[in-house]
Image: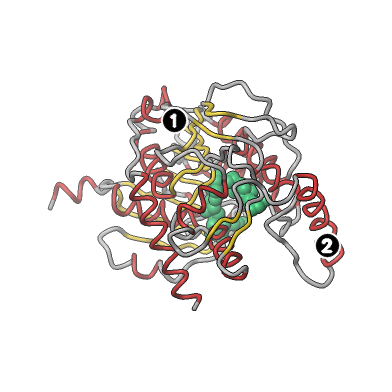
Amino acid sequence: MADSAQAQKLVYLVTGGCGFLGEHVVRMLLQQEPQLRELRIFDLHLGPWLEELKTGPVQVTAIQGDVTQAHEVAAAVAGAHVVIHTAGLVDVFGKTSPETIHEVNVQGTRNVIEACVQTGTRFLVYTSSMEVVGPNIKGQPFYRGNENTPYEAVHRHPYPCSKALAEQLVLEANGRKVLGGLPLVTCALRPTGIYGEGHQIMRDFYHQGLRLGGRLFRAIPASVEHGRVYVGNVAWMHVLVARELEHRAALMGGQVYFCYDNSPYKSYEDFNMEFLGPCGLRLVGTRPLLPYWLLLFLAALNVLLQWLLRPLLLYAPLLNPYTLAMANTTFTVSTDKARRHFGYEPLFSWEESRTRTIRWVQAVEGSAR
Ligand SMILES: NC(=O)c1ccc[n+]([C@@H]2O[C@H](COP(=O)([O-])OP(=O)(O)OC[C@H]3O[C@@H](n4cnc5c(N)ncnc54)[C@H](O)[C@@H]3O)[C@@H](O)[C@H]2O)c1
Ligand SMILES: C[C@@H](CO)CCC[C@@H](C)[C@H]1CC[C@H]2[C@@H]3[C@H](O)C=C4C[C@@H](O)CC[C@]4(C)[C@H]3CC[C@]12C
């Protein structure tokens, strides 16, 4: 008893803890981090599921707050040993203005860093994205690359621009003196496209398929590989990094790590069919049904429609020139840096990740009826 009380000494803060990834990080910490005494969950919108966590042995503190408000962030960070900063605006569909994306993703991250410095928190893990690397505006392939693969990382879209800037801030903050004089230790995790329970875009594709009579139409060549990683494994990487940063500060501080697991290399659409297929959807065509120039035209038309309709309603379809370029450019990762630096092995096999995701889509199906 005394032993476990002694072991449970750390206070963690997860920003964005009610999002798709954030919820998995929160649950993973509660399951896998024996040193946890208090878990603070900071989010703009708090989920009702947090209530069920409050009955366990770890103190769970839900904080409704906005990362763009420096004083709210500082109050949440004060006294935390580790901050996992996953909060962000993930928008590649034109739902939010570029200014808001910048404010949340860049200024929000700056606020988190400054809060750590001012209040004496020493360990900061940032959820970055594969998009800080690519695909770039030239659409050059990144084929099974690693953290050292040369690639021209040039962006124009507000979301990757904001993630790249925020990541740079986090990495540059490594080594800054925090209150008390000790150095801040930071690192960034770069997931590829995350999938798993709670994935909104998978839900959107599923509903689109139902509307189209159980069919989806191939738009992307099957040969274009798109990197994907299971949300449970991304969460597990966050937990491991957070745990190991203190012990391996010299090695891990200021580093970036792609998030990876044993999910197969496939095109975006073929990969989604691994889950949507067993739920009754069919991908029509072995080749794209429309020529690329026509898809590009439709994508551009969607941008025009979005602009024209903006005064009346928010029109934000999945297809736009940016998402088309993303889906149509090979970007896959093959690395073992996380294993070498902090002993990461995926917690969930591909089979388990697949089964869990299928079960979740089936539950979505049940609730859609
Ligand atoms: N989903 C992916 O495929 C993917 C891939 C790579 C990286 N990421 C990164 O992972 C992180 C989480 O992404 P996600 O897919 O879980 O997105 P999400 O939208 O599900 O979660 C983001 C969370 O941040 C919160 N948030 C947004 N603005 C906030 C603000 N101003 N203050 C406080 N909280 C705020 C939201 O309420 C939400 O709960 C993001 O930083 C994203 O860039 C996601
Ligand atoms: C042309 C359509 C025909 O079916 C397919 C459009 C698919 C797109 C909506 C998605 C293709 C690639 C996705 C992105 C990628 O997986 C990585 C991301 C990084 C992350 O930081 C946020 C999410 C995303 C941008 C993800 C969003 C959806 C796609 C563009």
Q: Secondary structure at mark 2?
A: helix
Residue at the left extreme of this rendering: 1
45 is higher (above) or lower (below) than 260: below
**Picture residue at 55% right of the left edge, 67% below the top:** 214
Describe residue 131's horizontal placement relative to residue 298 as left or right.
left
Describe residue 311's horizontal placement relative to residue 258 as left or right.
right
Place of residue 273 in the rendered image (x, y in percent of width and height, measured from the top left): 50, 53
**Picture residue at 74% right of the left edge, 43% below the top:** 157
Place of residue 244 in the rendered image (x, y in percent of width and height, measured from the top left): 35, 34
The crowd level at tag 2 (other Cα within 10 Å; few <14, some 14-19, many 20+) is: some
Q: Which residue is mark 2?
A: 305
The crowd level at tag 1 (other Cα within 10 Å; few <14, some 14-19, many 20+) is: some
Place of residue 267 in the rendered image (x, y in percent of width and height, measured from the top left): 56, 43
**Which comes sooner in the sequence, label 1 or label 2?**
1
166 is higher (above) or lower (below) than 78: above
Q: How was the colour assigned to the protein in this rendering?
A: secondary structure
Describe residue 257's horizontal placement relative to residue 245 as left or right.
right
179 or 124: nearer the eye?
124
**Picture residue at 33% right of the left edge, 35% below the top:** 345
295 or 254: nearer the eye?
295
Q: Is residue 24 in sight in this rendering?
A: yes
Residue contact between numbered discs 1 and 2, judged by CB atoms under 8 Å: no
Q: Which amino acid is tagged 2? A: Leu
Describe residue 222's horizontal placement relative to residue 354 as left or right.
right
Q: Which residue is mark 1?
A: 182
Q: Is residue 73 in sight in this rendering?
A: no
Q: Nearer the viewer, mark 1 or mark 2?
A: 2
